[in-house]
Amino acid sequence: MNKPIRGVSLLAGLMFLALMINLTGSAIFRQASLNNDPRNVRVRDAEYSQNRGDILVGSMPIATTRSSDGKFAYQRVYPSGPEYAPITGYYSYYYGRSMLEQTQNAQLTGTSDAQWLSRITGTLSGRKPEGGSVTTTINAKAQDAAWRGLKGKKGAVVAIDYTTGAVLVMASSPSYDPNRLASHHLNETTEAWKELVADKSSPLSNRATREIYAPGSTFKLVTAAAALQNGYDPNSKIDAPNNWILPGTRTPLTNETNCGGNQITLTHALEVSCNTAFGKLGVGLGQDKIRGQAEKFGFGKVIDSDISSVASKFPEDLTDAQLAQSSIGQFDVATSPLQMAMVTAGIANGGKLMTPYLTAQVRASNLQVVSEHRPKQMSEPMTKESAEQLKSMMVSVVNNGTGKRARIDGVTVGGKTGTAQTMKGKAPYAWFVGWSDKPHVAVAVFIQSSDTAIDEVSGGRLAAPIAKDVIEAMR
């Protein structure tokens, strides 16, 4: 064999070797990701020919599969439709999957590594492959209360068991009916998708976890936490002028409430939600400390969880004027209701933030438990001492300040209201975040818009009563 032929043979052999290595690696390491890729038509057709597992709230299916005599053997059905759509997501032939239908696809199709024994047993016994069921952490009564509270409004509610991270409520309004996207009449799903995308109210948007908004005065909890972590205490006196010209500008920062015009305690500043006090406090602490505190609560990163979410953000390279505005949740600060529930949960749990999660348990098609979630700590944004001080300050907000509509007899409730300014001429966002000791729950309520007059929009008026109802539903 001459040299050129040897060279070509060697090259061909190396190419075949590379191909075999790639195929072997894909089979071993990429099988799950390839199977779960919604663009994989072969796998998609196979999935529609098998019994996909249920998504459950307790024993109630919020996504289930029924036999069908249509194009495919099984039809995906959502009995509670829009109320649980932010949790289940959709399962659509043309438009893929979202939320738990996507993050738990391997479990629902029975292809997860944890279900290998069930697959082998099924194959040996001649049974068709079936998916496993996913039991969520959602509390049905609390979810109903949140859904009722959001009726006629744009907004979202998230509630978390702050001792474990279990998500008890995830509601977003307006919502959509995932049954329309799951139909086997594919032309109808196309029309439904076009309608939903064109709808100006954005029903496909998951306002609870997938969208970020200015948090307004609820962010003062982060600024207060930074202060307590850096030498302040609840009785520390801070400046609270009625008007403050922002550094380097001619723009005044004003207060929505009467702050007294002199020095007030940190607790009272939180009670009356004093803008100038927290703006000056943030500038005094410096942007690195405020940003660092926000990051300890989860800002700037996507949660490593089964929850489909986006990162909240605190801006970089701020002037003092921008820092003052950011310290009260304005300028370019943007966060999801999930993130603000996490801030509240970290405070309520003595400074320890647990990773939020939606899946409590997975069962194989033979009902055997194949996986069960174990709570894990995400971070420790505050010391226990500082967290207990901030909890006490939040209780004072509910008992003596702007959060009085969240009071519940016989329950200790701490909270913080927020009213975030948006575009000129448009209603501000209304927020309330709070926690209770009975049950151990942290709640974030966000109202993007409602039929309330602009001058009557406030977190205490619109959002706090919804949080109260959610908490009471779990008692």
Image: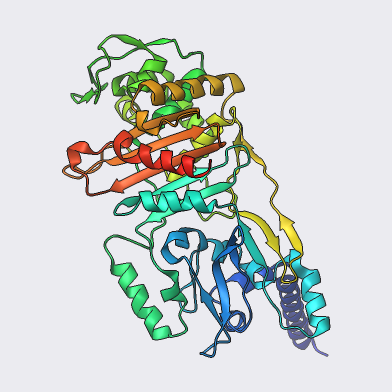
Taking the spot 38% from the left edge, 52% from the top edge, the residue there is: 148
Taking the spot 54% from the left edge, 38% from the top edge, the residue there is: 441
**In this view of the protein, can residue 320 be seen by the observer?**
yes
Taking the spot 62% from the left edge, 83% from the top edge, the residue there is: 46
Counting every numbered tag in the picture gives 0
Q: Farthest left residue?
A: 425
Q: Residue 212, how many percent across, how many down?
A: 39, 47
> In the image, is residue 29 above or below residue 381?
below
- Foreground: 116 or 475? 475
Taking the image as shown, residue 322 lies to the left or right of residue 64, namely left
- Foreground: 248 or 52? 52
Q: Quadrant of the N terminus?
A: bottom right
Taking the spot 47% from the left edge, 29% from the top edge, the residue there is: 413
The quarter holding residue 364 reads bottom right
The quarter holding residue 365 reads bottom right
Coloring applied to the structure: rainbow
> In the image, is residue 326 above or below residue 50?
above
> In the image, is residue 288 above or below residue 32?
above
- Foreground: 364 or 145? 145
> In the image, is residue 177 above or below residue 405?
below
Q: Farthest front residue?
A: 409
Q: Residue 289, how many percent across, how many down?
A: 48, 25
